[in-house]
Image: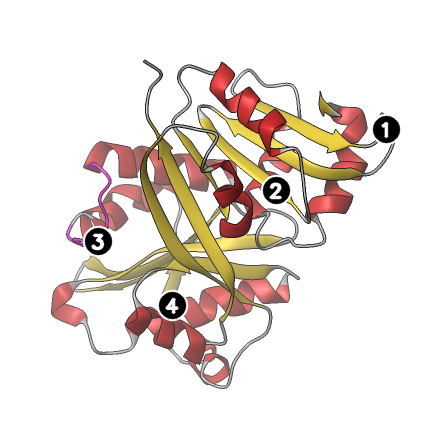
Amino acid sequence: MIRKLHEADRTRLMELVGRNPAINLYIIGDVENFGFDQEFMELWGECDSPDGPLKAILLRYYNSYLPYAEGPFDVDGFAGLVRMNIEAEMISGATDVVQAFRERINIRDEKQMYFAELKELGEVTRPAAAASLAIQKATVQHVDAICTLTDQIEEFLSRPEDSRKSLHKTLESGTGRTYFVEQDGKIIATASTSAENSLSAMIVAVATHPQYRNQGLASHLMAKLCADMLAEGKSLCLFYNNPQAGLIYKKLGFRDIGSWTMMYLNPPL
């Protein structure tokens, strides 16, 4: 049976997602930050009895959906919930779970990325984290200067106003942090987390100004960021689709734990 989840289901929800906190960092973070009674967010769970353990869940965050299951689950039931929302835009999550929806929804486009996790500092990370680099932690006052740098990075596709709004919200809410290096009166390298929760966080927006590359700045920033997060008892994870970038992350101690798929949906006819 599938039913909508409420605050009384928090413990059984965390029992399921807490067994794999990296892959479930978005679900954990959204529940910790917003609870169950928000207009923009809903959670459903599948269980064999009303009070039994959950075997699968589906999160709606605005018009994006994120399913999770550890084994077989009622794909048809969850897909029906997605189809009921005529504004549904995307289903994302662990590839083996998301692929189950392929024949049940109308897909416009699909992207797949490697998913890597860091649980302890690697041999490269330890000395890099201890390096005497003047690393600063950003506040909302630094948003424009940081985004002035990330605006120059081709791989970052966000519109300038969107990136500033998103970073401001993340720093203000405490759901992420940003470290940066400043030189000659401007920010020349940065690295951030997002979706921080009590168990894990996502590494995002690692960037170095083109004129200051090949100095190891991004590696030092990531090492410091990772060391601080691990000291708080949180694991780190990140997406990547560039094998060369994957080699750099693995030198820092990241290990592939699976793949992540995003399916973009066609609007209903």
Residue placed farthest to the front in the image? 103
Q: CA distance from mark 1 to mark 2?
A: 18 Å
Residue marked by disc 1: 49
In the foreground, 20 or 127: 20
Q: CA distance from mark 1 to mark 3?
A: 46 Å
Looking at the rendered structure, the kind of residue marked 2 is: Tyr
Q: Main secondary structure of the magenta part?
A: loop
Looking at the rendered structure, the kind of residue marked 4 is: Leu
Q: Mark 4, mark 1: which one is toward the viewer?
A: 1
Residue range highlighted in magenta: 152-159
Query: Dot 3: what SS?
Result: loop
Relative to 209, 143 lies left or right? right
Q: Residue at x 72, y 54 (%)?
A: 19
Tell which circle, 4 or 1, labels the residue nearer the N-terminal end: 1
Residue marked by disc 3: 155
Tell which circle, 2 or 3, labels the residue nearer the N-terminal end: 2
Quarter of the rendering containing residue 9: top right
Query: Dot 1: what SS?
Result: loop
Q: Residue at x 71, y 25 (%)?
A: 2
Residue marked by disc 2: 68
Tell which circle, 4 or 2, labels the residue nearer the N-terminal end: 2
CB atoms of marks 2 and 3 within 8 Å: no
Q: CA distance from mark 2 to mark 3?
A: 28 Å
Where is residue 140 shown, x and y percent of the image?
A: 37, 40
Looking at the rendered structure, the kind of residue marked 1 is: Ser
* Coloration mode: secondary structure
Residue 221 is one of the magenta-drawn residues: no
Query: Dot 2: what SS?
Result: strand
Residue 157 is one of the magenta-drawn residues: yes
